[in-house]
């Protein structure tokens, strides 16, 4: 009767945020401000995500009556399955996951886990052994008209990055800055957080959160983009366009993020006296001396740019016509280079926006050499023995 959910429904805070798990574990009353803030965005009646449904689709709705919060579970076949009162809530040792003490309309006491996926207010999970419910619910399925369209809209495709922000994690003393990255293509998304030293040199990257099966709905001037993790958990972003090169994203972390196209300032033939971050903030290139394997985002783009440009002998491309995804993995710096199909040079060339925008992959080895990957074989070969910035 009821769709049995996913093995990995309790997807936690967006990739890379090193938040403490020592949340307030005290029990909050059912009419607390904390519970009001948690459930107010979930008051709409939402159908179970179609990826979860196993026959009779169920609907979830939280509502408040007489100062108390309730959870109503219904289905088209059975009508009201249960109408439970939330007696109290308690945070768990997992970020953004809460345990509710419930009493059903048949006076059955039980526990239910609830979490907003990634901490944002776009989709949530409920997990309760009572009624065998373990499902995901996407608000856009109830709040945004129309069917999901396959792929991602061209306007939001590309690699996006926040500006440098203060690192709140355990490495903050030696790596005081972070950036959140989000990459969106027509078929996949990925997000990760980079950690930088005081000179904005990249030293560490959090594990990427990768998804596939991308689709979207348009909601006025914004887009709801949905995709799925390997365990079929939905990841949902609400993306508003600020300009061609800037967006606001809800659903990546517990708060909205303003992100810009992950581009750089124009490259020069020699080292630059100053550089810009991938989101446009200034980085002092003269003081950010390169080490053998740790570079600023701008320095690595300066280094790889001649090899990227060589792939376009008949086009007048600039480094700003591409976006870049720098990541540290196993002590090596990897950079994926993607065409920015919103750039004029690619629009004017009539590029097929449905094609994979990735054009090259590079890595800086622990010895400081630059290698490029053969797209056909996956083999790596040295193209430069060292950075001469």
Image (cartoon, rainbow, N blue to C red):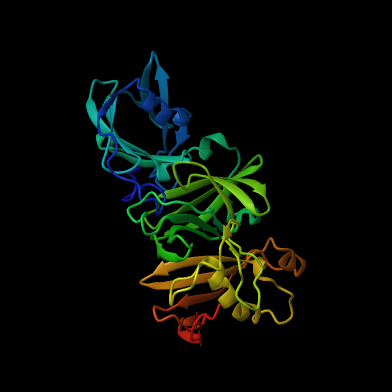
271 and 345: which one is in front? 271
Q: On screen, 211 above or below 60?
A: below
Residue occupying the point 48% across, 29% down: 44
Check the picture and name the quadrant holding the N terminus.
top left
State the image quarter where residue 240 is shown. top right
Check the picture and name the quadrant holding the C terminus.
bottom right
Residue occupying the point 42% across, 79% down: 365
Question: How many badges with numbers are in the image?
Answer: 0
24 and 250: which one is in front? 24
State the image quarter where residue 173 is shown. bottom left
Residue occupying the point 57% across, 49% down: 216
State the image quarter where residue 302 is shown. bottom right
Horizontal side of residue 3 vs 335, given as left or right: left
Q: On screen, 152 above or below 286?
A: above
Residue 212 in percent (x, y) is at 48, 59
Horizontal side of residue 296 vs 124, given as left or right: right
Residue 313 in sight:
yes
Residue occupying the point 63% across, 51% down: 246
Residue 183 in percent (x, y) is at 53, 59
42 and 275: which one is in front? 275
Residue 53 in percent (x, y) is at 40, 44
Instruction: Return the residue found at the far front.
Output: 287
Residue 87 in percent (x, y) is at 28, 22
Q: On screen, 332 above or below 244?
A: below
Instruction: Return the residue found at the far top.
Output: 66
Horizontal side of residue 284 vs 84, given as left or right: right
Instruction: Return the residue found at the far right.
Output: 348
Residue 278 in sight:
no
Q: On screen, 346 above or below 29?
A: below
């Amino acid at each position: 009767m009821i769709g049995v959910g996913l093995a990995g429904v309790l997807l936690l805070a967006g990739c890379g945020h090193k938040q403490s798990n020592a949340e307030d574990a005290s029990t909050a009353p059912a009419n607390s401000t904390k519970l009001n803030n948690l459930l107010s965005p979930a008051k709409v009646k939402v159908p179970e995500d179609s990826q979860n449904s196993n026959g009779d689709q169920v609907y979830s709705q939280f509502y408040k009556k007489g100062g108390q919060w309730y959870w109503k579970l219904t289905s088209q076949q059975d009508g009201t399955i249960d109408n439970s009162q939330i007696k109290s809530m308690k945070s768990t040792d997992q970020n953004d996951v809460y345990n509710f003490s419930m009493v059903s309309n048949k006076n059955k006491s039980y526990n239910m886990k609830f979490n907003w996926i990634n901490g944002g207010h776009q989709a949530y999970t409920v997990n309760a052994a009572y009624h065998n419910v373990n499902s995901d619910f996407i608000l856009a399925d109830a709040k945004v008209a129309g069917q999901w369209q396959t792929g991602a809209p061209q306007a939001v495709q590309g690699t996006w990055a926040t500006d440098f922000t203060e690192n709140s994690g355990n490495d903050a003393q030696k790596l005081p800055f972070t950036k959140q990255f989000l990459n969106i293509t027509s078929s996949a998304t990925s997000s990760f957080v980079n950690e930088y030293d005081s000179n904005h040199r990249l030293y560490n990257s959090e594990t990427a959160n990768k998804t596939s099966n991308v689709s979207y709905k348009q909601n006025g001037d914004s887009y709801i983009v949905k995709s799925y993790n390997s365990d079929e958990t939905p990841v949902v972003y609400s993306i508003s366009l600020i300009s061609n090169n800037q967006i606001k994203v809800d659903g990546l972390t517990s708060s909205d993020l303003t992100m810009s196209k992950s581009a750089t300032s124009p490259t020069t033939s020699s080292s630059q006296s100053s550089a810009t971050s991938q989101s446009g903030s200034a980085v002092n290139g003269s003081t950010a001396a390169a080490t053998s394997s740790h570079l600023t985002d701008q320095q690595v783009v300066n280094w790889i740019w001649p090899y990227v440009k060589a792939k376009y002998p008949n086009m007048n491309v600039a480094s700003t016509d591409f976006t870049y995804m720098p990541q540290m993995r196993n002590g090596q710096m990897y950079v994926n280079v993607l065409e920015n199909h919103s750039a004029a040079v690619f629009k004017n060339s009539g590029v097929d926006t449905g094609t994979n925008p990735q054009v090259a992959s590079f890595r800086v080895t622990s010895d400081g050499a630059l290698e490029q990957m053969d797209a056909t074989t996956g083999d790596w070969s040295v193209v430069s023995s060292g950075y001469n910035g």
